[in-house]
Image (spheres, rainbow, N blue to C red):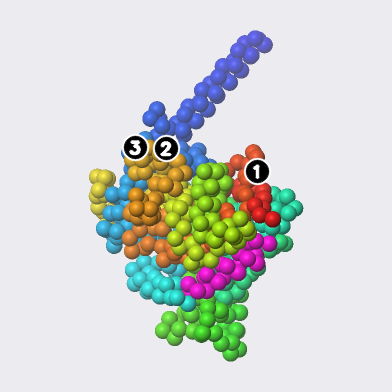
C-alpha cells in the first residue's frame, strides 16, 4: 500500500508539473515567441507574466512581427490593443490624421489625476492651453529665468552635494539627485518658490514621492480592465488606494503654492519687470485678466507642468550619465569637446559652463539624443481613434481599440535605426558636415510628434546640457559594482533601483 501511495503521489506531482509548465509555456507565448491567445482571457495572462520586463517584451514582440501586433484583451473587457512601432503608422496617427486620434475620454479616465491640464485636454481647450503655454515659455524673459535658475541650482545645490559625496567617499543615488534638481528648478519656474529639496540634508519630499506613486498606478491602469481598477477605486483598495493618497498630497502641496502666490500678489509684491528675477508661470496665469484661471484650473496646469519639467528631464539625465559613465570612449569625446570651449590655460581646472557656451557642443547634443533614443523618458503612448480607419500598415482600427506606441522598442528596431540599433553611438546623429542630424519626429518620438510636439524641448536640452557638462568635466562617475540597472514599470522610464554610484573629483 505504501508503495502504491508513493507511486500515486509521484504521478500527481508529475501531473502538477505538467500542468504548471503548460500554463507557463502559454503565458510566455507560442512557438514563435508571441503571446498565447487564451479563450475568454485573450493574451492578458502573457501580459501580466511579463509585466516586470514589459519594455523588453514589447521589443521582442515587435521585432518578431515586423513592427505591428494586435494584443487581444479579455473578451469581456473590450481592451484590444494594436501596438505599433512602424514610423508610417506613427506619422499617420500623430500628424496626417491627427484629428481622428485625440486623447479621448478613455485617456482622460486613466489619467484623471491630471484633471483638465494640457496632457489630458483635446480640441479647443487643448489649443487654448498650448497657445498660452507656448507664448510664455518661448518668451526671452522665461529663457533668461531658466538659464539663471539652472545655473544657481547647479552651483548652490548640485555641486555641494557632489563635492560632499566625493570628499566623504559616499555612495549616492544620482537618480534621486537629478529628481531633486529638476523638482527644485521646475517648481521655481512654475510657481516662483524653491522647495530646497537638493541639499546635503536630502530632506523628505512628499510631493515627489506622491508623483512617483501616482505614475506607477497610472501604468497599472493601462494593463487592467477599466471595471477592475474602477472597482478598486470604489472600494479604496490596492493600487487605487495608493493613488488616492498620492492625489491628496499633490492637491495639498499645489494648493499651498497657489494660496502663497495669491497672498504674495495681494500684498502688493511687484514683479521686477527689468530682469528675469521674480518671473514664474503661476504669476503670469493669475495676473493675466484674459485667462480667468480659477484654483482648479491653476491646480491642473501646475501639476501637468511639474510632471513635464521634473520627470522627463531627470529621467533623461539619469540614463544619459549612466550611459556615458559606462562608455569611456564617449565620455572622452565629450570631455575633449568641453575642453575646446575653454581657453588652454584653464582647460585642466574645475569649471561650470554657461548655457550659451554649450550651444555649439555638437557631440554632447548628439549623445543626449542618442540616450533619449534608447531610453525615452515617456516609454509609451496610446491613442484611440474617433472613427474607424486603416493604418498605412494595412491594419484596421476602430473606436473600441487602443493604438499604442512603444518608444522604448522603437529606438531598438533595426529596420528603423540599422544593424547597430542596440548600440549607444552618438556618431549616428552627426552629419558629414559636422552638424546634428535632424531625424523626423515620427522616427525619434522622444519629444512627441505632430501638433502635440513637446513645447519644452529646448528647456530640457538647456538643463540637461548644463548638468551633464558640469558632471562630466569635473567628476568621474562610477557605477557601484553589482548594482543592477534596468527600467521600472511606470509611465516615466526610471531605473528600478535607482542609479547608485560613487563620485571622484577630476581636479584639485
Residue 247 picture location, percent across and down: 57, 64
Quadrant holding the C terminus: bottom right
Label ID, residue 65: 3
Judge left or right: residue 503 versus residue 440. Answer: right
Q: Earlier in the sequence, mark 1 or mark 2?
A: 2
Secondary structure under badge 2? helix
Label ID, residue 149: none
Residue 142 picture location, percent across and down: 48, 74
Residue 233 picture location, percent across and down: 54, 57
Q: Marks 1 and 2, Cα distance to the nearest angstrom?
A: 29 Å
Quadrant holding the N terminus: top right
Label ID, residue 60: 2
Please say if 379 is above or below 66.
below
Q: Residue at (64%, 14%) from the top-left corner? A: 6
Q: Does residue 475 appear anywhere in the picture?
A: yes
Q: Marks 3 and 2, Cα distance to the nearest angstrom?
A: 9 Å
Secondary structure under badge 3? helix
Between label 3 and label 1, give the one nearer the viewer: 1
Residue 469 placement: quadrant: bottom right
Residue 357 picture location, percent across and down: 50, 64
Is 407 included in the stretch rendered in magenta?
no
Q: Does residue 114 appear anywhere in the picture?
A: no
Q: Nearer the viewer, residue 299 or 208?
A: 208
Mark 1 = which residue?
Answer: 480
The residue segment tinted magenta is 142-160
Judge left or right: residue 114 versus residue 504. Answer: left
Q: Nearer the viewer, residue 297 or 266?
A: 266
| Residue at the extreme front of the image, as rendered | 345
Secondary structure under badge 1? loop
Amino acid at each position: 500500500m505504501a508503495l502504491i501511495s508513493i507511486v500515486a503521489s509521484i504521478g500527481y506531482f508529475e501531473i502538477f508539473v505538467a500542468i504548471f509548465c503548460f500554463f507557463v509555456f502559454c503565458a510566455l507565448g507560442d512557438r514563435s515567441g508571441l503571446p498565447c491567445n487564451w479563450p475568454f482571457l485573450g493574451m492578458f495572462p502573457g501580459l501580466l507574466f511579463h509585466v516586470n520586463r514589459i519594455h523588453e517584451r514589447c521589443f521582442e514582440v515587435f521585432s518578431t512581427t515586423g513592427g505591428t501586433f494586435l494584443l487581444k484583451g479579455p473578451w469581456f473587457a473590450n481592451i484590444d490593443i494594436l501596438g505599433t512601432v512602424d514610423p508610417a503608422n506613427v506619422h499617420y496617427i500623430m500628424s496626417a490624421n491627427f484629428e481622428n486620434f485625440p486623447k479621448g475620454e478613455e485617456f482622460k479616465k486613466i489619467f484623471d489625476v491630471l484633471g483638465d491640464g494640457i496632457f489630458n485636454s483635446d480640441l479647443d481647450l487643448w489649443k487654448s492651453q498650448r497657445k498660452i503655454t507656448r507664448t510664455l515659455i518661448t518668451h526671452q524673459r522665461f529663457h533668461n529665468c531658466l538659464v539663471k535658475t539652472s545655473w544657481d541650482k547647479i552651483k548652490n545645490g548640485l555641486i555641494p552635494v557632489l563635492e560632499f559625496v566625493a570628499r566623504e567617499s559616499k555612495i549616492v543615488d544620482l537618480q534621486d539627485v537629478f529628481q531633486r534638481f529638476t523638482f527644485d528648478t521646475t517648481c521655481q519656474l512654475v510657481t516662483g518658490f524653491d522647495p530646497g529639496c537638493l541639499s546635503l540634508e536630502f530632506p523628505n519630499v512628499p510631493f515627489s514621492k506622491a508623483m512617483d506613486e501616482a505614475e506607477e498606478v497610472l501604468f497599472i491602469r493601462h494593463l487592467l480592465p477599466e471595471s477592475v481598477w474602477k472597482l478598486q477605486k470604489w472600494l479604496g483598495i490596492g493600487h487605487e488606494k495608493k493613488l488616492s493618497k498620492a492625489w491628496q498630497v499633490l492637491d495639498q502641496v499645489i494648493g499651498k503654492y497657489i494660496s502663497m502666490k495669491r497672498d504674495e500678489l495681494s500684498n502688493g509684491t511687484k514683479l521686477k519687470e527689468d530682469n528675469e528675477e521674480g518671473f514664474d508661470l503661476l504669476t503670469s496665469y493669475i495676473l493675466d485678466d484674459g485667462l480667468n484661471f480659477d484654483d482648479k484650473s491653476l491646480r491642473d496646469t501646475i501639476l501637468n507642468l511639474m510632471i513635464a519639467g521634473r520627470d522627463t528631464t531627470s529621467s533623461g539625465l539619469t540614463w544619459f550619465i549612466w550611459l556615458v559613465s559606462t562608455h569611456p570612449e564617449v565620455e572622452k569625446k565629450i570631455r575633449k569637446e568641453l575642453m575646446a570651449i575653454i581657453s588652454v590655460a584653464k582647460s585642466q581646472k574645475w569649471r561650470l559652463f554657461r548655457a550659451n557656451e554649450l550651444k555649439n557642443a555638437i557631440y554632447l547634443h548628439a549623445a543626449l539624443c542618442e540616450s533619449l533614443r534608447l531610453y525615452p523618458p515617456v516609454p509609451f503612448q496610446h491613442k484611440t481613434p474617433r472613427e474607424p480607419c486603416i493604418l498605412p500598415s494595412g491594419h484596421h482600427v476602430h473606436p473600441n481599440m487602443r493604438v499604442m506606441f512603444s518608444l522604448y522598442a522603437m529606438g531598438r528596431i533595426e529596420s528603423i535605426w540599422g544593424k547597430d540599433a542596440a548600440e549607444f553611438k552618438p556618431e549616428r546623429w552627426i552629419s558629414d558636415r559636422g552638424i546634428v542630424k535632424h531625424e523626423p519626429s515620427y522616427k525619434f518620438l522622444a519629444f512627441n510628434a505632430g501638433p502635440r510636439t513637446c513645447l519644452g524641448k529646448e528647456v530640457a536640452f538647456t538643463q540637461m546640457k548644463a548638468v551633464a557638462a558640469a558632471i562630466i568635466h569635473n567628476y568621474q562617475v562610477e557605477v557601484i559594482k553589482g548594482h543592477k540597472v534596468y527600467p521600472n514599470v511606470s509611465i516615466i522610464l526610471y531605473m528600478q533601483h535607482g542609479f547608485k554610484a560613487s563620485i571622484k573629483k577630476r581636479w584639485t
